[in-house]
Image (cartoon, grey):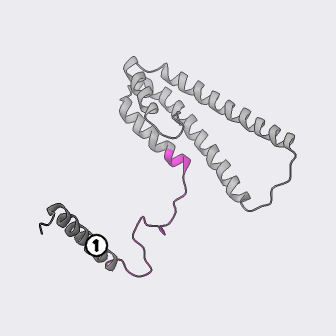
């Protein structure tokens, strides 16, 4: 009876993988899961830190001239201010977690949703104005870099 060499290879690799898993499991101390595992400490999202990181990356890519620094600073300050406002809103939401919500009729819920959308639209309009003002200070090559940078960013694909 002729054996299939591929089947032997699969069985050998399976045994080798199983041995590696057992060895890895033996090296994890009891009660202390591996870093990044299921029970790793949760790090809350920080909009200011995230925005600063993106701004630092963008500034490095743009290679700004001294004459463009003031426009950059105004843009960056506005982005950080928006991130701080977002942090405050997140903290308010976390503080209200677990509190009972008032029972509202449908029309009132829709009014509140419309107000939130108006507020969000105003924030986006302000971000667009800040971006437009900054982009006017950039060369065509820098504008292309700026646009490509933001297009490559996940989660909303909009400036900080």
Please name the residue shown 22% across and 68% down the image.
Answer: 11
Above-or-below relation of 143 to 17: above
Q: Is residue 39 magenta?
A: yes
Q: Position of residue 39 (x, y in %)?
A: 49, 69
Please name the residue shown 14% across and 66% down the image.
Answer: 3
Name the secondary structure under disc 1.
Answer: helix
Q: Quadrant of residue 138?
A: top left
Tally of numbered discs = 1
Within 10 Å of disc 1 (Cα), the crowding (few <14, some 14-19, many 20+) is few
Q: Position of residue 71 (x, y in %)?
A: 50, 26
- Quadrant containing the N terminus is bottom left
Above-or-below relation of 151 to 53: above
Overall secondary structure of the magenta section: loop
Residue position for label 1: 18
Q: Along the line of sight, which residue is nearer the eye, 89 or 56?
A: 89
In the orientation shown, which residue stands out farthest toward the bottom? 30
Q: Position of residue 27 (x, y in %)?
A: 31, 78
Please name the residue shown 69% across and 53% down the image.
Answer: 93
Q: Along the line of sight, which residue is nearer the eye, 138 or 125?
A: 125
Residue numbers of the magenta segment:
27-50
- Locate residue 117 relative to residue 134 in the image: left or right: right
Q: Position of residue 58 (x, y in %)?
A: 42, 35
Q: Is residue 35 magenta?
A: yes
- Locate residue 105 relative to residue 113 in the image: left or right: right
Q: Along the line of sight, which residue is nearer the eye, 46 or 100?
A: 100
Q: Quadrant of residue 109?
A: top right
- Locate residue 152 relative to residue 107 in the image: left or right: left
- Locate residue 112 relative to residue 65 in the image: left or right: right
């Amino acid at each position: 009876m002729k054996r299939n060499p591929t089947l032997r290879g699969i069985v050998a690799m399976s045994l080798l993988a199983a041995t590696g898993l057992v060895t890895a499991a033996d090296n994890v101390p009891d009660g202390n899961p591996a870093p990044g595992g299921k029970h790793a400490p949760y790090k809350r999202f920080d909009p200011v830190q995230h925005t600063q990181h993106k701004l630092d990356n963008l500034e490095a890519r743009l290679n700004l001239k001294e004459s463009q620094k003031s426009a950059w600073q105004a843009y960056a300050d506005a982005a950080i201010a928006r991130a701080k406002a977002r942090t405050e809103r997140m903290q308010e939401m976390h503080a209200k977690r677990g509190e009972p919500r008032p029972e509202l009729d449908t029309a009132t819920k829709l009014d509140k949703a419309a107000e939130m959308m108006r507020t969000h639209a105003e924030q986006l309009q302000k971000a667009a104005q800040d971006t437009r003002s900054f982009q006017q200070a950039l060369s065509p090559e820098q504008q292309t870099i700026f646009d490509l940078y933001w297009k490559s960013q996940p989660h909303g694909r909009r400036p900080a």
